[in-house]
Image (tube, helix red, strand yellow):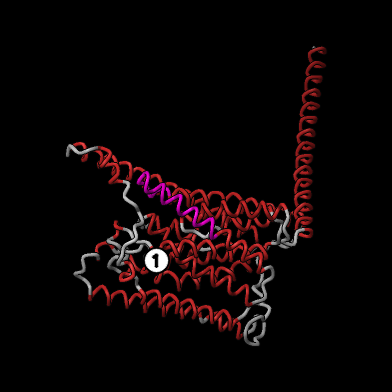
Amino acid sequence: MKNNSTLSWFILLLTLFITFNHSHATQTESISNSLRIEHLLDKFYQWRSHQTQENQLKLSTPVVVAGVLCFIAASISSAGGIGGGGLFIPILTIVAGVDLKTASSLSAFMVTGGSVANVMCNLRSTSPKYGGRTLIDFDIALLSEPCMLLGVSIGVICNLVFPEWLITLLFATFLAWSTSKTCKNGVLHWKTESEELKRNRCETLENGSDESEGIEATKEPLLGVKEDCKLRFPWMKMGILVLVWFTFFTLYLLRGNRQGQGIIEIEPCGAGYWIISSLQIPLAMIFTAWILCKKDSVQHQASNHEDEDQDPIREGPSNKLIFPMMALLAGILGGVFGIGGGMLISPLLLHVGIAPEVTAATCSFMVFFSSTMSAFQYVLLGMEHTDVALIFAVICCSASFLGLVVVQRAIQEYGRASLIVFSVSIVMALSTVLMTTYGVVDVWRNYVSGKYMGFKLPC
């Protein structure tokens, strides 16, 4: 009995000893991993600080590499009609080593350059599939632009108030959801196109004609320039869009920024600053209501027009108001995340059933107005490195032309407009990974250093 008791005590002590050692080893390993991660973060921040101090956007290897990567990003983004700011900002900050403020200003010019190429191509082209009209849906652009510009201003204020961890969380959640929805839409369009191509081949074989002739019929150019495209160009709608742009731009110039930099003397973040800022709300409501009334009047006068069935903005206030609401949401999120609204409104338009080619053309048209406004504001408020910004804008413009040519030829060759949707998915997925990773690193660094991580005042 004594031997059994001694053996039991020995086994118990051995078990406790092994458990203690295992627990101690686990804690030591956990501490070691934490120190290793913190050491890697310190090395990363030291490298980025060194890049920021040494690299003042002079001709160097990091800047050249960043230019090449931005060229590739712009060529991919152009196909989907989105700005690509979600790729430009991480490339400029991580590769070129510029600070976030400079990267944002450069990104505005780069998005402008890419959108110029898109708009020039889309304005000169018409689609036989849509009755010889341009792929740009000016009605969607008219209904969306005032609310998008208002949303950007609200989003910028939220960006100043929200803590970085909340911005990163919202960004990752929304873009992950949008990427998933866009991929599903791409797969759905791909299946629909496959069924259509199969049906065309079957009809060709039943009619006894050459199969190659039927295949060529499905490869009809998506964008065909027609002689009467100038007669179809909606100059009135274009004029209203320019009027909206100049009205909001005038308010931005009168208001200035939080430091009081503007065309008039105004107290920084004073009563005048907020009064002028709040004028954007009734202005957006007035423009949207006026455009809706004008749209109703035109529809009533042309109710028997043969092209009326192809209008994506159908009868009923719920179908019309969905575009301003989507634009407001996209503008707010774009202002909060510091990227263009095109990457956010594109999946929303695809989700409500707008055709991929129309979505891409319309989004690029809307991005042109918002990006040019941002670029002009940066210049008038004393932006530095304007020459470098223009060089990057030319690079992105050339890349966008190249991307559009490649995608259009691919669509003509294979008859699949879903390639546009997949290009949007690629850009959104890369932006989600890059910007979320970049934001998580900054949030972790602020947490470790003990910085304040709560809500802040806008001024």
User: Residue 181, can we see it?
Assistant: no
Segment tinted magenta in the rendering: 397-419
Q: Quadrant of the N terminus?
A: top right
- Residue at coordinates 72% horizontally, 56% vertically from top-left? 97
- Residue at coordinates 38% horizontally, 67% vertically from top-left? 140
Q: Quadrant of the C terminus?
A: bottom right
Which amino acid type is shown beneath numbered disc 1? Phe
Say above or below: 241 vs 421: below
Residue 379 at what x, y percent from top left?
63, 74
For mark 1, give the secondary structure.
helix
Residue 401, magenta (yes or no): yes
In-front residue for pair 430/113: 113
Residue furthest bottom in the image? 265
Say above or below: 98 vs 377: above
In-front residue for pair 4/378: 378
Say above or below: 452 vs 37: below
User: Residue 409, can we see it?
Assistant: yes
Residue 227 at what x, y percent from top left?
31, 65
- Count of numbered marks: 1
- Which residue is tagged 1? 323
Res 275 → quadrant:
bottom right
Most common SS among magenta residues = helix
Answer with left or right where residue 378 lies relative to residue 115: right
Residue 370 at what x, y percent from top left?
51, 69
Residue 339, magenta (yes or no): no
In-front residue for pair 193/213: 213
- Residue at coordinates 46% horizontally, 58% vertically from top-left? 81
In-front residue for pair 19/213: 213
